[in-house]
Image (cartoon, rainbow, N blue to C red):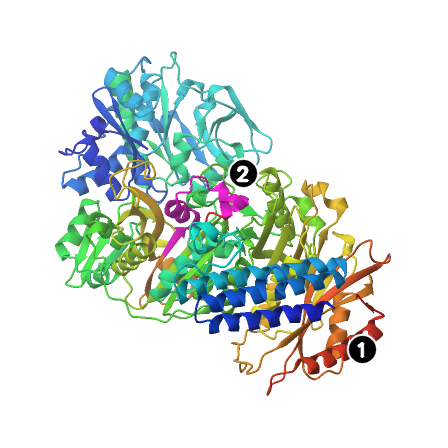
Amino acid sequence: MKLSCEWLGEYVKSKLSPQELAGRLTAVGLPCEGLEQAGDDWVLEIEVPSNRPDCLGILGLAREVATVCGGTLEVPEAVPEKGRASVASMVRVTVEDQELCPRYVARAVSGVKVGPSPGWMQRRLAAMGVRPINNVVDVTNYVLLETGQPLHAFDYDKVAGHAITVRRSRPKEKIDLLGGVVKELDGSDLVIADESGPVALAGIMGGERSEVGPGTVNVLLESAAFLASGIRRTGRRLVLSTESSYRFERSTDWNGVEYASRRAAALIAQLAGGSVASGSVDTGREAPKPKQVTVRYWRVDNLLGAHMEKHVIRRILLDLGLESVYESGEGVTFLIPTFRPDLSREIDLVEEVARHFGYERLPAVTSIPVAVPRKSPADLAAAEVRRRLAGLAFCETVTTSIVPREQGLAIRPWRSSRELTLTNPPRTGQDFLRQSLLPSLLEVRRVNQAACVRDVSVFDLGRAYLCRPDGSVDERRLLAALDDHSEAAEDGPFGRLRLGLDAVLEVFGAAGELRVEPGELPYMEPGEGARLFLDDEFLGVMGRLAEKLRPLYELRTRPAMWEINLDALIARGRPLPRLEPLPRYPAVRRDVALVLDEGVSWSKVAAAVAGAPCPLRESVEFLSVFRGKSLEAGKKSLAFSVIYRAAERTLTDEEVNSLHAGLVEALTGRLGATLRA
Amino acid sequence: MSSTLSARVEEVRVQALSALADARNAADLEKVRIEYLGRSQGRLRDLLGALKDLPAEERRAAGAKINALKEDLTAALAERAGRVGPAGAAPGGGGGAGGPARADLTQPGLARPVGHLHVLTQTIEAVKDVFGALGFSPVEGPEVETERHNFDALNIPKDHPARDGFDTFFLSCGLLLRSHTSPAQVRVMESQTPPVRVIVPGRVYRPDAVDATHFYCFHQCEGLMVDEGVSFSDLRTVLSMAMEGLLGPGTKLRFRPSFFPFTEPSAEVDVSCIFCKGEGCKVCKQSGWVELLGAGLVNPAVFEAVGYDTERYTGFAFGIGVERLAMFRYGINDIRLFLENDVRFLEQF
């Protein structure tokens, strides 16, 4: 809403400079977003909050200014001189839907001479960004800007049958609006019609047929109240927004309807000549009963946290146009003017007091009782998981949950009874709420590929959006990691990922036994995918992206990745670690390299070591795997260390050598291996 | 066999270090040097000789171990030489003219990869820490929400202009993606009686046109405190302390009246620019202030929607734009960088 300082001066005298005014209005919640000089005038751009329809008229802003600077508000007189004819004899008004149009006031001015409006009015309109047209139309715009009440002037002689009907449109009914726009209506839009059809789209825009022009002699003036939600619906559907609809959507003042009608009729007669027909046609039935609201002094103090003097509270509210109807030592009961629909409860009055007293004058040092904050187990676990993975040189990503449909559908490790789809997606095709973090991580890989970043080790801890069989949404916390390097790592494509996975499981202590079960997954390359189980519960998947899916994610490489159900891990609980006594005697390490069939997995070897009867064996550690020409086809050499330790003495070389030899012999037998000499 | 060799390497290491520790002067040290590192009969030479018996693929690893031992011993010898006596007893092999070998403290290390937490995670953790110190517990809420939680219970009626500020993504099933974290307020109050003191960091969605300051998916952190006698001044106190904690001592706040359907009185809160200390600069667009929060007392209509006694309880709520806070703290100029995850961006924080 623009505000001309010169125009404002007509209603309130203040000594504030335009810059000071901008600051003071901002400080009472009417932020000034711009300040421009227009000739001798200054124009402020005020962002009026949606609960303050009264401030969409300069009079309303003037009331705020008067409260800010202690000035007096001068509301212009609006008493048109009465002509001989009566409006009632000139026009018939029928309102078919009282709810959509609770009040319609018609006035008429006969014998006008349409021409340009005077310079002062043209200047004021132009300063407010409204193009002057002619003295009649300009008056309606002028009064709209002054009072916030939209008006419409019809050429009386072009209103067929001199009968106005406010009704819902008929389905597929057409209307020719000002500026040559034709709109097709559905059955719900409210129109102003005469005997031959719609002449205006109620509260939004007038029609071309009854427009006031140079030849107009008699004017029919409409001032009405329309249901805000109805105007909003029609405006949205037809994509029409006007000064008028903007104000009706925010609701207008019941009493302002009549005042603005009188004000405009008087101004038209003053500027365009003619005589104002006596009286009016007013369809308004019962005026809404003015609300009464009591504000208790102690409540103001309690809510604001500071003592407010009674006279300060009273002065602010009276200046804003409220009327005191009852006062006691406890508080005041006010009559709320109808132009303030936002004031209906005590808290609304407390806000007015706070606003005009000044937020910045309220204390900012109070004492607040101490409280112990609690972090949820999920929060604590997530923080620890992040720390561990970052410690292993994975970078954390945060990715959007809305993914391109095809990409989201291609990787779905988790069951979901249906898909969640956006009806108004940010981009065509990007309408899928992800069911896995893997498509997101592949997109991260693509972004980095485009940025020529060759090596990427990332993880994401985020939500996937799954549906339970009963249809409810399960926003499941998942954890996924992706690893993609330009040079092959010593421990293979999954080495680093596995290290990360083990570190995560360690966060949950003895959560259970991880089982990696190689198998086919539709999105992983055959032979390079596996399901993960913790004890017998499905925990997630691991593998390398299937070659056939590479183009879908626009990748040149096939990254290795895993994804696990973090919620399932969190649900298992996270016991604090218990101290294990430190060993008192040193360990002895022996390395061994076995030549095995390709099909013998590490997990089989580890199980064989674990299963061999050898009491002093403490643990086994993977060292390396070797494939090459020096080996038979279909064979690999697997090297690992076995660590031996006795709890109560230092082991001797001889003892370990013999234990180790025994173990190696057992292993070669069980695994069909030979020793790599 | 490699296990034996590896064991032997360790054995030699222990013995050599022990001999070094026993050396009392330069002459002792020279003896140790000859015994272990000597070119013709040194024990390391023997170890190297044993390499040829190993299978080819293991030779490299074993060789590396022996070399590491050699480097360790050379270094230990030099270090010991510096302690036992005057110069002149420098071990052979390159030390010669320049005196005893010294560590080059100007030399950098070999780069090893390091992981990073996402800057949004770091920002949210900082928020949790600061508000934690003020007694606020972090909680979470769902992102897929109902109209009731996202709008109705927050006093944002259908077909009301107040909804204009909350453009929303709708799902085909009738649910929606929350357009702010405030619905979590409602959920907390539905499940808990006062006193309440929580923050709710989380993701929100709005179908904004994407540019340097708008993305359709971003993060907010909601805060809520409800008890008997909680006042607007308490809100001012908590936010002042928290912003000093997050942005540094001396950070100032400015409360401007505003309108939000779910708070009353409502405020937009600006913080003094940490870069120019309020003098005016590019970051704050010469104003000295940066808008960072929305806040206010909880509207009694919201208390009514969750069944709290509006006469007994009062409270305040606030919302922080997490990306905005991070952009301000770290000088990030484009909101799109956060969710793009270019590793070169991630590694800077």
Kind of element beneath mark 2? loop
Circle 1 residue: A666
Quadrant of the rendered image containing residue A102:
top left
- SS assignment for the magenta stretch, majority: helix
Segment colored magenta:
B318-346
Q: Say if the magenta span includes residue B326.
A: yes
Quadrant of the rendered image containing residue A28:
top left
Q: Which chain is home to disc 1?
A: A
* Front label number (2 vs 1): 1
Identity of the amino acid at label 1? Ala
Say whether disc 2 or disc 1 marks the residue closer to the N-terminus. Answer: 2
Give the residue at x 39% y 11%. Answer: A215
Give the residue at x 45% y 39%. Answer: B334
Disc 1 residue crowd, few under 14, some 14–19, many 20+, Cα 10 Å: some
Instruction: Identify the mark at residue A138; answer none if there is no mark.
Output: none
A604 or A318, nearer to the observer: A604
Residue B288 is at least partly visible in this image: yes
Kind of element beneath mark 1? helix
Disc 2 residue crowd, few under 14, some 14–19, many 20+, Cα 10 Å: some
Residue A416 is at least partly visible in this image: no
Measured from the top left, where is residue A552 in percent x and y? 71, 42
Q: Say if the magenta span includes residue A54.
A: no
Left or right, B128 with reference to B29: left
Q: Which chain is home to disc 2?
A: A
Circle 2 residue: A188
Measured from the top left, where is residue A656 in percent x and y? 69, 80
